[in-house]
Image (tube, rainbow, N blue to C red):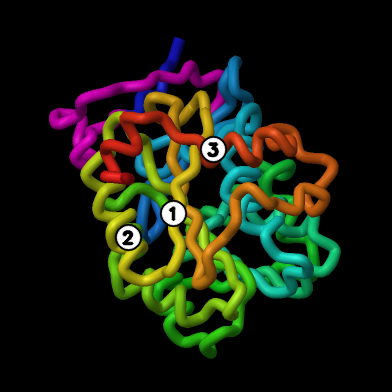
């Protein structure tokens, strides 16, 4: 029996010798395995989670539980807008976030700024239920550095900016820096919504503290929210929602939530903003 192991260090190392956690997946079949200019890319068939995408031996998404992450990152900010029309996804090469945003009928353009074209190509072929959004004419693919791309866009040109990044190692590290967040804020319309994945509270505390404090320097309103994603390290996963304008989380237009979600319900949307006491303490939320 062949296994694929991913190694998780809290400090951001990618070497097995410095790992602190390990997760293993039985490999029924290797569907794709190659090395791009940026990273190693593997798509495997597993008996429990179906097909799974790995980047540099770290699991990014699986067919069985991908909807949880993709719904949380996309819909929590998107339902704040009455008629979202233009969205930018930084990363998102598997297509899952774009698929969720395509569910909004007012959406006219969704740009996926992905640095690694091979991720998109492999996902389209081997993860079609996730990557099907790339066949929607509203979805535009922009290959290259997402931080550089957003910096060259006109101010106040997006309703939504979502950061679907890897962990803060390798090419993804620029997506956790103040300059990048400030640029994103500038490119949002006055009522625009920003959200980013925020790692695991139990093992990425320092990165989350820095991310939260940096976002608060730039946006007038920042709130963490959470979900449980079985295949992510420790399962508990944090996200950050930010806006130029203060948002009333007790007054959410739930009717805007797409009807075909699999994780989010009206109650789950509100509950997502309820975070445990230890996370409040980690982030120094009074």
Q: Nearer the viewer, mark 3 or mark 1?
A: 1
What span is colored magenta in the figure? 7-33
Q: Give neighbour class at mark 2: few <14, some 14-19, many 20+ (Cα, 10 Å).
A: many
* Residue position marked by numbered label 3 in the rendering: 61
Q: Nearer the viewer, mark 2 or mark 3?
A: 2
Question: Which numbered tag is attached to residue 165?
Answer: 1
| In-image side of 170 versus 121 (left or right) | left
CB contact under 8 Å: marks 3 and 1:
no
Coordinates of residue 246 in the picture (x, y in percent): 53, 65
Q: Give neighbour class at mark 1: few <14, some 14-19, many 20+ (Cα, 10 Å).
A: many
Q: Give neighbour class at mark 3: few <14, some 14-19, many 20+ (Cα, 10 Å).
A: many
Q: Nearer the viewer, mark 1 or mark 2?
A: 2
Write the residue at 31% across / 55% down. Answer: 211
Is residue 122 in sight in this rendering? Answer: no
Coordinates of residue 141 in the picture (x, y in percent): 62, 70
What is the spatial separation of the Cα atoms under label 1 and label 2, in whole angstroms? Answer: 9 Å
Above-or-below relation of 175 to 56: below
What is the spatial separation of the Cα atoms under label 3 and label 1, in whole angstroms? Answer: 12 Å
Foreground pick, 165 / 121? 165
Q: Give whichever of discs 2 and 3 has the lower sequence position.
A: 3
Q: Give whichever of discs 3 and 1 has the lower sequence position.
A: 3
């Amino acid at each position: 029996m062949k296994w694929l192991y991913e190694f998780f260090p809290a400090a951001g190392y990618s070497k097995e010798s410095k790992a602190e956690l390990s997760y293993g997946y039985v490999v029924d079949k290797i569907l794709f395995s190659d090395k791009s200019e940026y990273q190693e890319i593997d798509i495997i068939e597993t008996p429990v989670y179906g097909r799974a995408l790995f980047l540099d031996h770290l699991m990014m998404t699986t067919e069985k539980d991908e909807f949880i992450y993709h719904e949380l990152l996309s819909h929590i900010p998107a339902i704040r807008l009455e008629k979202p029309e233009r969205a930018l996804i930084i990363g998102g090469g598997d297509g899952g976030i774009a698929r969720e945003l395509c569910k909004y009928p007012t959406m006219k353009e969704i740009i996926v700024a992905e640095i690694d074209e091979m991720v998109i190509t492999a996902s389209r072929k081997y993860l079609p239920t996730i990557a099907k959004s790339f066949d929607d004419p509203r979805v535009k693919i922009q290959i290259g550095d997402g931080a550089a791309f957003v910096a060259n866009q006109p101010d106040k040109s997006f309703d939504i900016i979502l950061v679907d990044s890897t962990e803060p190692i390798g090419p993804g590290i620029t997506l956790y820096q103040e300059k990048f967040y400030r640029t994103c804020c500038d490119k949002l319309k006055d009522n625009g919504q920003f959200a980013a994945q925020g790692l695991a509270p139990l093992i990425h505390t320092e990165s989350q503290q820095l991310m939260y404090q940096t976002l608060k320097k730039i946006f007038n309103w920042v709130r963490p929210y959470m979900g449980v994603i079985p295949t992510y390290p420790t399962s508990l996963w944090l996200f950050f929602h930010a806006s130029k304008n203060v948002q009333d989380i007790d007054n959410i237009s739930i009717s805007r939530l797409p009807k075909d979600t699999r994780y989010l319900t009206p109650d789950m949307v509100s509950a997502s903003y309820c975070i445990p006491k230890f996370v409040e303490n980690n982030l120094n939320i009074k």
